Amino acid sequence: MSIRPVRSVATAVPTIEGAGVKLHRAFGFTDPKIADPFLLFDDFRNDHPDDYLAGFPWHPHRGIETITYVLAGTVAHGDSLGNSGTLGAGDIQWMTAGSGIMHQEMPKGDTKGRMHGFQLWANLPASQKMTAPRYQDLEAKQIPHLHEDDGTIVKVVAGTFWGKTGPVEGVSAEPQYLDIFVPAGKRRTFRLAFAHTVFAYVFEGSGRFADASAPQGVLTEKELDGRELVFRDLSGDRTIIHFNAGDDVVVEAGETGVRFLLISGKPLGEPVAWHGPIVMNTQAELIEAVNDLNNGNFVKQGAPSKT
């Protein structure tokens, strides 16, 4: 067993997107190799309706998947082919844009004015860039919850973890998408696929993440707890942590506990030609996509399937 070393730590940066929505961007629109197969991660938590109600009016997507996770408030969404719906607190939408879709997302706060959630973009491999669009709209009740004796809670959105499998399926990146709470003072270990890209995003409380490699060989949880490990103190909200290769992410919660997303996926290792929400493999494909958009030929398929 080896502990994943911390590669980088940063704080999400205030950004304005859509029709004037104020959010925080943890990464995106930089080097696509940084988090391959993931391209962008936005934190759109906001308690002031004037800062988010303008929303994200009609815009195109091609060649990627967008994953929206709502914590509070609602997001009404629709597309140019007549599909529509509303995501509520705890709900997930995993949208495979594939060959192209025109889409809009309009947030609305809860009774306290809170609009909280996240959006992740995942790249599609070349073989699936022009696949038919698909939605996986998932209600909070469909997401397995793991409750451990020490108070740790894990929500499994995608992938299989600790014997539970999330409802998202058929995604080429083989992702794991976990929403984790570790109570105050507890140390927990989370095993992920060795060669997958892994990042954590702290959004409540504080904690420390191990930044050391253990000797090769299998260590039990008891043996791991007894080891002297080097930790990075990551106190505070909106912290993004990228990890290098390894087996385990080890976290030790601070005095109020820590809640974070832990996300992993299989790198594609493919060239990326990127223009906003359109992501292809070559510049020629990108130019073709932009021409399609300008000429009214962007949507190639019939109505997207919904699961």
Image: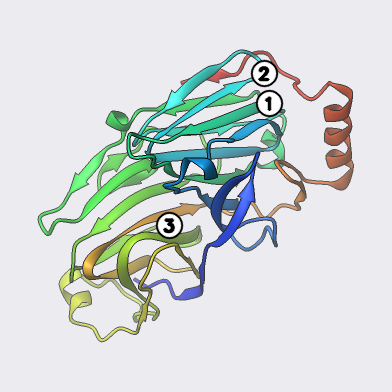
Q: Position of residue 25 (x, y in %)?
A: 57, 56
The type of residue carrying mark 1 is Ile
- For disc 1, the neighbor class at 10 Å (few under 14, some 14 to 19, many from 20) is many
Q: Which of 206 and 265 is in front in this view?
A: 206
Q: Element under label 2? A: loop
**Residue nearer the viewer, 237 or 172:** 237
Which residue is denoted by mark 1 in the rendering? 101
Residue 80, which numbered label?
Answer: 2
Q: Around disc 2, counting alpha carbons within 10 Å, would you say few (fewer than 14), some (14 to 19), or many (20 or more)?
A: some
Q: How far apart are marks 1 and 3 (CA)?
A: 32 Å
Measured as percent of width and height from the top left, residue 69 is found at 43, 40
Which mark is in front, 3 or 2?
2
Whether residue 20 is situated above or below residue 269 in the rendered picture: above
Q: Which mark is residue 48?
A: none
Residue at image position (35%, 35%) is: 89
Which of disc 2 and disc 3 is earlier in sequence? 2
Q: Which residue in the protein does label 3 denote?
A: 193
